[in-house]
Amino acid sequence: PAQPLHFVLGAGTYYERPFLELADYIITGAGMGQTVISAGAAGRDPWPGEERTGTFRSQTLFLGGGSARLEHLTVENTAGDGADRGQALAVYADASRVCMVDVSLHGNQDTL
């Protein structure tokens, strides 16, 4: 598309694990601490067909594809102590270009 796909999230906590792999996109929230994307996956969690989830499948938010822009929100991984649960990502940034403005990332280990 000529223009990036634009997701606008209102205030609230979204208990989701979005996986975005699009050409160009923007995710806009209502503000840090007001719009929160939250999940608690961890590297030592079970994974179908395999022993563990592993670090690179533990993310709360996956950003793939072309250009990703996040603004005015919080992304958190609430898995807890890495010694108990293994590594856990808040954001896995695999897009060609990533820009974060007014974004707060929370995690206990390997946040980004």
Image: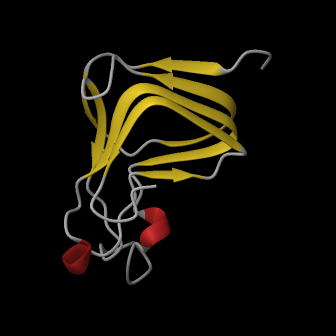
In the rendered image, residue 48, in percent from the top left (x then y), is placed at: 40, 72
Residue lying at 68% horizontally and 20% vertically, measured from the top left: 4
In the rendered image, residue 2, in percent from the top left (x then y), is placed at: 80, 16
As rendered, which of 90 and 42 lies closer to the eye?
Answer: 90
Please state if 30 lies on the left or on the right of 34 as rendered: right
In the rendered image, residue 67, in percent from the top left (x then y), is placed at: 69, 35
Depicted 26 relative to depicted 47: above or below: above
Looking at the rendered image, the quarter that the N terminus falls into is top right
Residue lying at 35% horizontally and 71% vertically, measured from the top left: 87
Q: Residue furthest bottom?
A: 51
Depicted 96 relative to depicted 8: above or below: below
Q: Quadrant of residue 69?
A: top right
Residue lying at 23% horizontally and 79% vertically, measured from the top left: 83
Q: Quadrant of residue 107?
A: bottom left
Please state if 75 lies on the left or on the right of 27 as rendered: left
Residue lying at 31% horizontally and 77% vertically, measured from the top left: 44
Q: Residue furthest front?
A: 102
As rendered, which of 22 and 63 lies closer to the eye?
Answer: 63
Depicted 3 relative to depicted 18: above or below: above
